[in-house]
Image: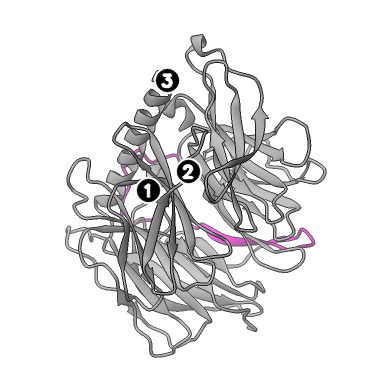
Amino acid sequence: MANRKRFLNAMASLLFTSALLLSTGAGASETGQPAKPPQRVSTVTLPANIAFTSNHHLWLLDASLPQAAPKAVTRSGSAGIIGWSFDGAWLLYTFQANPQAAGSPSTLWAVKADGSLAQQVDPRPVTGRPQWSPTARKLVYFTQGADGRLQLLLAEIGADNKVKTRLLPTDAEVADIAWMPDGQGLLGSVPAGKNRPMQLVKLDLTGKRTETYRLGNPPNVEEGIYPYLADGLKVSPNGRYVAYFERLNSASLSADGVPIKLFDLQASVQPKTIGSGLAYPEWLAWSPDSRLLAYIVGGGREATANKQLAIIDATTGNPVVAPPAQSDRVETLPAWAGGPNGTLFFTRGKGSVAWEGKYDPRKPLVPGQRIWMRSAAGAMQPVTQGDDRTADTYPNPSPDSRTLLYLRLDGAEHGSLRVKTAGTSADRELLTNVTGDPGYYGNYLPAWVQVYWKKKTNG
């Protein structure tokens, strides 16, 4: 219990540091004055609901309406985007009322896609990764109880548009959670302890344990540092595989890179180590057919250097794309589009280790970074073009891969949202003055932009 409390306290400190970074300077100009409000500069229409941040605030845009303007959801404090519900009807976000105050808590909120009925899901501070159900307007999240223990809760938005929450009592000390693809159950992670190995557990929506998976052997806790938690769980669309990060019971050591594991929930074999990298679930992406896992490898906590794309075939355990032994490039944010085989989008640029918070906000952290695409046949090519004065990030491909929304940065904390259509060399600017913070060591998380595609595009 003591080791677990030390780990949670260290992680809380790390998360608070990241949140503090997110709350200072984001969206401000060189003079310290607020940036200009966002503007829609193109009437191009897309079947998409777009959430984005500007000046710390949350904004929404229905891009299917040619004359629709960005709508502000928050006008004070600091908001962070979590994501859209499965049907695009609701957006989940975090809100800090007083981000400049030390220890200011983040609470969980939901708002309808049209910007109405913003409401607090829970008045208590939220921790971990709140997650929508893949099939319903339900979500799971963690808070910390009065005794310091994590509490797992389930919330549901009913037909009356009101949020109802309930505690999910479990007989396991769950510290991370993910939905199973059918929306009928959860996969939880139980930390290691004395005489107890790391475990994965399946839970139903009452919190009852239905399956237990043992991950290795109990640690030697007397050694001080040991593998502690399967974190950042990412379940394949067919529910068979799960990828995760094997965190240590030291937040500082884990921040420099941890083993990346792949586990078959239907086989009686131990997890396979497939690389080492930073523990960002946003850097794990399953192909639509559940065969391929795209992920980012590379040590060092700077997200702007020594990070390369890897792809593994989960059915065989064999690499499909192996990162080079030595490379000065940096690749991040893999995102699959739809289709039977899937097309993969990701960012690529020339890496830079100049970070530690000492950056010029007028310049992108990875100058010349572009969006690349890997076709179902394996061919790779850049999708966007530009010079070293800009950098492209947050690829959001349409389900049919023909339309790409992405953010073009003209500085470390400022950019515009652009649209690229397959078969054309030019792209179009849709929104200006999208702002945020580079995040923890340049990871650009949480994302400044989240897109819900209402239907398939036709170009």
The amino acid type found where label 1 is placed reads Gly
- Seen in the picture, residue 240 relative to 253 is either above or below; the reply is below
Q: Where does label 3 land, which residue?
A: 3
Q: Do the residues labelled 1 and 3 touch (CB within 8 Å)?
A: no
- Please name the colour scheme applied to the rendered image: one colour
Q: Is residue 364 visible?
A: no
Whether residue 368 is in magenta: the answer is yes
Q: Which residue is drawn at 52% across and 34% down?
A: 171
Q: Can residue 14 be seen in this view?
A: yes
Residue 112 location, quadrant: bottom left
Left or right: residue 341 compared with residue 296: right
Q: For the residues carrying marks 1 and 2, which lies nearer the camera in this image?
A: 1
In the image, residue 133 lies at what x, y percent?
Answer: 54, 59
Inter-mark Cα distance, 1 to 3: 28 Å
Q: Which mark is residue 303?
A: 2
Where disc 1 sits, the SS reads loop
In the image, residue 175 lies at what x, y percent?
Answer: 48, 36
The amino acid type found where label 3 is placed reads Asn
Q: Where does label 1 land, which residue?
A: 439
Q: Residue at x 29, y 48 (%)?
A: 124
Residue stretch rendered in magenta on the structure: 352-380
Q: Are marks 1 and 2 in contact (CB under 8 Å)?
A: yes
Where disc 3 sits, the SS reads helix
Left or right: residue 432 compared with residue 289: left
What main secondary structure does the magenta stretch of the protein show? Answer: loop
